Amino acid sequence: MTAILAAIPPNVLAAIPAPPSSTLELGPLTIRFYGLMIAFGVIAAVTIAARRWEARGGHPDDISSIAIWAVPAGLVGARLYHVITDNQRYRDAWLEAVKIWRPGLGIPGGLLLGVSAGVWVAHKRGIRDINGLLAAAIPAIPVAQAIGRLGNWFNQEIFGPPSDLPWALRVDPEFRPAQYAENETFHPAFLYEGLFNLCLAAVLIFLDARRWLKPGQMVPTWIFGYGVGRFLVEAIRTDAATEIFGIRVNHWISGTAVVVGIIWFVWAGRRADRMAATAATTATGADGADGSDTTSGPRSADGAIDSNGDGTGDAKADEAGDAKADGDR
């Protein structure tokens, strides 16, 4: 046993091992772990969102009904984003582009189309509190992303430069970039992004629980946070990617997400303040019309309206005072 351990390189003992296989064979059925992780992520997200929506007074079945449309839309959007941004891979094999079960999903496209489809279905179902629905559902999305990222481990993809850190990822030779063919362990970029997404989900839930976000600010906060995390992860990825002016496309998208998130956050906050002010004004006006005494004018010493200004009050008020005096006796 000692001889076996001595034969293993030191960095391998301190590294995340490469997966034994990317597929699971069940008789004639072949299941890709990549797709399985995505499915697990969807189940986790639907469960979390349903419980949070129910806690807000909504019906948990709303989330399942929305997911039926939002999840396929998200997968299509993710595939479209990948094919568009990495179109050079499919120029001579366009049929490969429609094979959505194969690796190659662009998360930004999936999030955009999936969330848009979810909001559309919510409107169709007659859900009026869209901001509340989004506040309940959005924190579940980074959790799904984090679980889905585990699929990249099975595919041995989305890793950074070589590393000897204890959590470095061992990559088999056929998956290593040509310039790093002699290196065995690399930064697990997919794991970094997954952990960041879990932290982002926790922060969103915390902010929502403390009521620190105004109505409509959950989505831009999530967009901003995801943009920051993705920008950092893209900085260490070593896989080939389409570039614009020498900068990776996903860097452009992430930077845009950060800017859009900030602008949207400010706009949503101001809109929420205006709506609150309008509601307060409306409520004040309603108070004056609900039977409360809003009559103005000078009053006599006994509180009666003094329309003639001589301090004696109106005749009716005087008669009422006399009658009250007689009754007091």
Image (cartoon, rainbow, N blue to C red):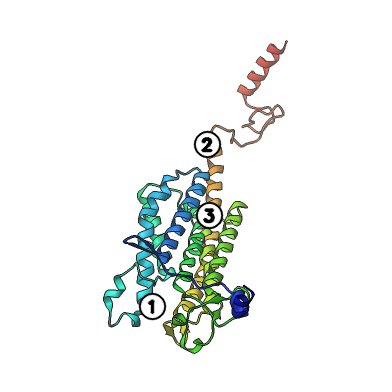
- Quadrant hosting residue 90: bottom left
Q: Which circle's residue, 2 or 3, is located before the other in the chain?
A: 3
Secondary element type, mark 2:
loop
Q: Nearer the viewer, residue 279 or 309?
A: 279
Say which amino acid is labelled 2: Ala
**Residue at coordinates 42% horizontally, 69% vertically from top-left?**
22
Foreground pick, 251 / 28 = 28
Mark closest to the chain's N terminus, 2 or 1: 1
Is residue 59 placed above or below 202 in the rendered structure? above
Q: Nearer the viewer, mark 2 or mark 3?
A: 3
Q: Which residue is mark 2?
A: 289
The CA span between labels 1 and 3 is: 34 Å
Q: Would you identify the image quadrant in which residue 303 lies?
A: top right
Residue linked to disc 3: 215
- Up-down: is 320 above or below 227? above
* Mark earlier in primary sequence (1, 3): 1
Q: Which-is-in-front pick, marks 1 and 3?
A: 1
- For the question of whether residue 132 can be seen, the reply is no
